[in-house]
Amino acid sequence: MTPLDWLTQLLEMLAALAAAPLFVGWINQCRAWLQNRSAPSILQPYRAIRKLFYKDAVLATHASSFFRVAPYVVFGAMVGAAAVIPSVSTRLPFSNAADAIALVGLFATARVFISLAAMDVGTAFGSLGARREMLVGFLAEPALLMVIFVASLISASTALPAISEGLATRTLALYPSLAFTGVAFVLVLLAENARIPVDNPATHLELTMIHEAMLLEYSARHLALMEWAAALKLFNYACIGFALFLPWGLATGDSPNPGTLLASIPVLAGKLAIAGAALAVIETVSAKLRVFRAPEFLATAFLLAVLGLLVHLLLGA
Amino acid sequence: MSNSSIDLQLLNAFASLLLLLSFAMLSQRRIVTMVKLLAMQGMLLGLATLLLAVRTGQNHLYISAALTLSLKALFMPWVLHRLIKRLGVYWDSEPLLNITVTMLAGLLIVIFSFGLAQPIAEFANTATRSAIGIAVAVVLLAFLTMITRGKAMSQVVGFLSMENGLFFGAMSASYGMPMIIELGVALDVLVAMLVLGVFFFQIREQFDSLDLHHLEKLREEK
């Protein structure tokens, strides 16, 4: 591993940290345009995070130290995940430490901590949100794993950089299995990031909340970290999607080259812009499902992913 | 696989889409959407046949592609839509099992039929032999669709989808059946369709519903 690789690694993590709120801001802006509202500034998430960092934290009387530690753990898990996902380059020193399965484990760690913290204070809404989160999570996780397995089978590796390198350099062919898993991945992304068919990120009605209900007791820097972590999670999922289904434009190959690295940054920005707009369209045209329909939604994702796997095994495509 | 020709890749893609449509039918609550899905399945089947005809240059495949497109993609869905309108049964909800369980059962069926088709595919010498498993899966999924529905209308849709699966199986195993058999089957299905259409009205007249559970009682009650 050369110094340039470590520099790439650092650059990638910083890019994820900096770009995640921007990505959320972009999605919110697109959504506002599509819904004929005047759009908030694209920088709005940064302002919200900055404002929250300046405030004094208020803790519930019954909050244990777990409640205070959770935001840092969740944030750390998301930064760790960003470190192993190839968003600009496939030469990442950290990616030797965790393959795609460990990555799913990192997301699960964050989920467990955020849910336990929500239950820690003992309010009704917190527990409600935590339970729903676990319901969504335990159904989304196998679907995500199946999606990753299909890509791993095609490229014969479970490490994300190796997968996207393998997929980017293969000859172009129709892969029905990848198409199926691509749809499954979008469904999982929507469910895991509290987007509209499953949860509404902008809701103010506690009874329909999943993600927001878990954050109700948080304030100031803790809330800022949680919000930032949520933005990072969405960014990470988008980058996993690019790594699996749109791996072109990444800096690949064995010889490190600052030129390709620099060229891959605008490509990533373009992909993010398109993905954000597409996400906004999906969220605008679909209605929120009843909570008890969410298992059906995720069962569809699982089904599509498994079908992709089976079709790949049968047809080799 | 990546070095195989584009038309074979397209055929494989069509095969996987057929499978996907079968699942969509299995999980569908509305009869109108089911008929639309059936029409799409017929369309895909016709396109796949056409592609295979271009690929192999066999003339009888062109005829069966034309038959499939006209009968299965246009005529039968049209008849079904008319029936739905005349009977006024737009909703055919309540599959007997819940959707998630049905879909998981469907997955097991797919695994079973892929295993079942493995030895058959080894004996076939067509380029499309790997799709035989998908054809078997489509047939069995259509069975499952018929089993999990109580109403006559969706059972007929399942029946027609099963015929699609059989047709696709014959196509991928041996580039289609002999013309005479193909015509015979197409005619049979058409007649069955028309007879069932008449039958629907009879059932509804007798029981005021299209629920086939009423047919399970055979006692004369006066």
Image (spheres, coloured by chain):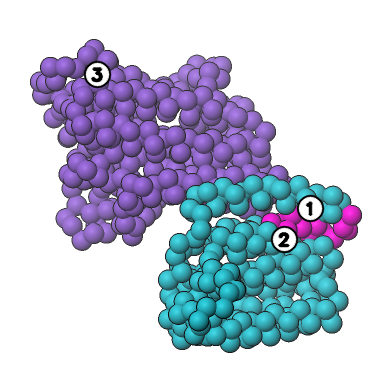
Where residue B202 sits in the image (x, y, percent)? Answer: 55, 85
Q: Mark 3 points at which residue?
A: A67
- The answer to which image quadrant residue A226 occupies is top left
Q: Is residue B216 or residue B5 the one in the foreground?
A: B216
Q: Which of A218 and A63 is in front in this view?
A: A63
Q: Position of residue A106 (x, y in %)?
A: 44, 24
Name the disc covering residue B135, or none: 2
Q: Is residue B136 magenta?
A: yes
Residue B139, x across and y down, in percent: 69, 62
Circle number at residue B117: 1
- Give the color of chain A as drawn: purple
Write down which chain is painted cyan: B
* Mark 1 residue type: Ala
Gap between marks 2 and 1 measured at Cα: 9 Å
Q: Toward the viewer: B141 or A64?
A: B141
Is-magenta flag for residue A58?
no
Q: Can residue A260 be seen in this view?
A: no
Q: Which of marks 2 and 1 is nearer the N terminus?
A: 1
Q: Which amino acid does label 2 sit on?
A: Ala
Label 2 resides on the chain identified as B
Which span is picked out in magenta? B123-137
Mark 1 lies on a secondary structure that is helix
